[in-house]
Image (cartoon, coloured by chain):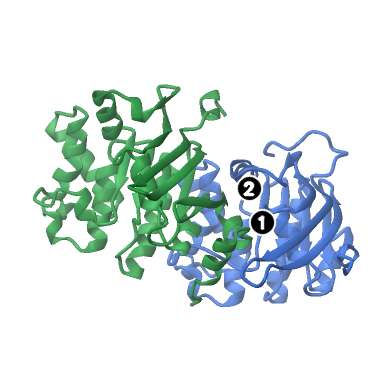
Amino acid sequence: MTAALEQPLLQVRGVTKHYGARLGCGDVSFDLWPGEVMGIVGESGSGKSTLLSCLAGHLPPDAGEVRFDVDGSLRDTLQLTEPERRRLHRTDWAFVHQHARDGLRMGVSAGGNVGERLMAIGARNYGEIRSQAADWLNRVEIAAERMDDRPTAFSGGMQQRLQIARNLVTGPRLVFMDEPTGGLDVSVQARLLDLLRGLVREMGLSAIIVTHDLAVVRLLADRLMVMKDGRVVEQGLTDQVLDDPQHGYTQLLVSSVLQV
Amino acid sequence: MDDCVGESDKAMIDCEGVTKRFTLHNQGGTVIEVLSRADVQVAPGECVALTGASGAGKSTLIRMIHGNYLVEEGRITVGGVQVSGADARTVLRLRRETLGYVSQFLRVVPRVPAIDIVAEPLLTAGWHADAARAHAAGLLTRLNVPERLWGLGPSTFSGGEQQRVNIARGFARNYPALLLDEPTASLDATNRDVVLSLIREAKARGAAILGIFHDENARSQVCDRVVDVSAFRPVAT
């Protein structure tokens, strides 16, 4: 292994966010290594979405640092200049929203949605943009003849796959995902999970996935963080946390899952 | 062979004074003590069977070595890497490079074709997709999984077919250490013999194997030693 891999991709220290007097998330710290997928689970109001927003730069935390590997050195992303921040969001980072329509431009064709992100980082050759977009639609199993259709004409599962293509086309190193399989039919979820697993492996992606679905994290995440009332109550290897939970709350969560 | 630790006199799998107890916080803090001060060593090229009555802690010990259960007290190392108290990253790397595991049940993304399930550990190790699939096909053929099933998700397979997919996956890579939880359960005589030859071949290339074998005949054919985990029963307090 090269020395470059011996540094975390993302280093989070003491991230805290209050909404008035109420705690959104408190004193969250962890390291994410290249190629790792981390799940964050907890019930509604546990602070998992607040944490994700703070990490992804959508919400300024009250305290803490979110350091990301920029050209080999860890830089606090909260202190970046605006152009640096914009570059990060267009190249190295990606965000997959629960509702595809929040991450897509619904008035633009499928090919345009993917091509737009390439153009944002400076691609100008129409033929190349179109062929890269076509390649990505193929990778997320959207037929080439649907390239010029708008996402409004797509099913929920297709929209979500399009959103993933739009996000991954620039070859990001870190992907934030907020309930990526939420709201989809169970049969569509399985296919999306398999697609995500394959892409993560092929591209060596790191990802942080927020979900309330323990089955999804078991299949997708290497590591797991459990949140309750804004605090991390437990974290570790995913199968260890699920099979040998140490905290009472995690034990309750795991034992409450309905068995099929 | 992948990066094996050089010192041949050292155990590949080493458990020293390993204790496991579960605390059930939602049931009045009940503490269930399963194992106390367990010692087990497995050398390269050796196959050791864990025995003991149901509930004695055989699977618990296997799961602790795999990093699936936390270790309360004592020390576990695999290939010189300490598993007890290790962070997620260390355990993940160990599982990727050194330690294979054939569980009793197959847990996979629904509807993923059987052949891809078997090929996945190879892809993760950086094999080319075609080579990984060809190797997976060879194992499935050897384990008599009919080719018409390879493209299907195993959830509709029989128990024996699922177990054979699971075994093929577990043996896809030449891990230096291997954990087997009832690998021959629910298999007919022919397929049991295939699994036993896979175990013999793994031993011959120097793998350290620790397993649970309910089938006495299978155990006596491949295991060099037996460790009865009842010896590590916690003293009642």
Q: Is residue A191 left or right of residue A104?
A: right
User: Can you give x and y, in whole percent of width and height, for residue A240 in the image?
Assistant: 61, 56
Proximity of marks 1 and 2: CB atoms separated by less than 8 Å: yes
SS assignment at label 2: helix
SS assignment at label 1: strand
Residue at screen point 81% across, 70% down: B56
- Could you say which disc has been placed on residue B101 in the image? 1
Chain B, hue in figure: blue
Q: Is residue A192 left or right of residue B148?
A: left
B5 or A29, nearer to the observer: A29
Tell me the quarter of the picture where residue A182 sits: bottom left
User: Can you give x and y, in whole percent of width and height, for residue A193 in the image?
Assistant: 39, 58
User: Can you give x and y, in whole percent of width and height, for residue B87 in the image?
Assistant: 63, 43
The residue tagged 2 is B95
Letter of the green chain: A
Residue at screen point 61% across, 42% down: B93
